Image (spheres, helix red, strand yellow):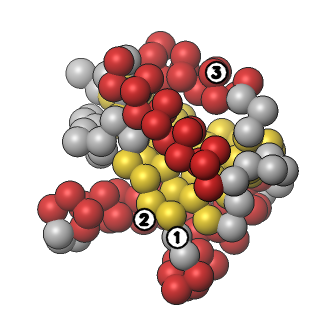
Amino acid sequence: MSVFQLLYVSAAAKGVDQAEIEAILASARARNAAQNVTGMLLYADRSFLQVLEGVQADVEAIFARIAKDPRHTGLSVLLEYNVPERNFREWSMGFERLQASDQAQMNAIFQINGGAIRQRMTPAQADQVMVFMRNSYNVTTRGQL
C-alpha cells in the first residue's frame, strides 16, 4: 500500500512569534498523531517548509486546516505524490529550526522556498528539498545518512 505525501511552503504571517511557532508545532503533533499522519516541519527566516504523509484523505484534511490558518501566508503546494513507504514514520511532526549558523542550508533551502512561495520552484528543486528533509530525519533519528 502506498503512502501519500504532500510538500508545501508558506510564510509566517506578520506577528507570528516563537510562542506561536511552538503552538503550531504542539497542535500539529497532536492532530497528526490522532490521524496517523507523519511528517517534518522546517522553519527559518519566517518561512515554513513542511511534508505531510499518510492516507491521502487524512493528509488533505490536515492540509485544508493549515490552508485556513491565518498564521500562514503565501501557501504553495510543491509536490503531491505516492511513495512506497513513509519517510518520517517515527515523527507525528518532526521539527527543525535552521539558525543563522546553518547559513549554507538556509540559503539553499529557503532560497528555493522563497521561489516556491512565488510559484517558481521546479519539480527537480522540490525533489532536492525532499532529499534534504529525509537526510535531516535520518541523521536526527538514526545518526546516519
Residue 23, position as x, y percentages in the image: 55, 39
Q: Is the residue 96 above or below the residue 58 in the image?
A: below
SS at badge 1: loop
Q: Mark 3 points at which residue?
A: 64
Query: Mark 2 falls on what kind of element?
Result: helix
79 and 20: which is toward the camera:
20
Locate the N terminus and report the quarter of the image it occupies.
Answer: top left
Specify the amino acid type for callout 3. Answer: Ala
- Residue type pointed to by label 2: Phe
Tell me if I can see residue 111 in this picture: yes
State how far apart marks 2 and 3 are (Cα): 25 Å
Q: Which of marks 1 and 2 is nearer the N terminus?
A: 1
Disc 1: which residue = 98
Q: How far apart are marks 1 and 2 (CA)?
A: 12 Å
CA neighbours of label 3 inside 10 A, class few (<14), some (14 to 19), many (20+): few
Q: Which residue is drawn at 63% across and 21% down?
A: 65
Q: Which of marks 2 and 3 is in front?
A: 3
Answer whether labels 2 and 3 touch (C-beta < 8 Å).
no
Kindly indicate whether the residue at mark 2 contacts the one at mark 1 (C-beta within 8 angstroms): no
Q: Where is residue 30 in the image (x, y as percent from the top left)?
A: 40, 27
Q: Earlier in the sequence, mark 2 or mark 3?
A: 3
The residue that label 2 is drawn on is 132
Q: In which quarter of the image is the C terminus?
A: bottom left
Residue at 45% over, 60% down: 96
The image quarter in which residue 122 lies: bottom right
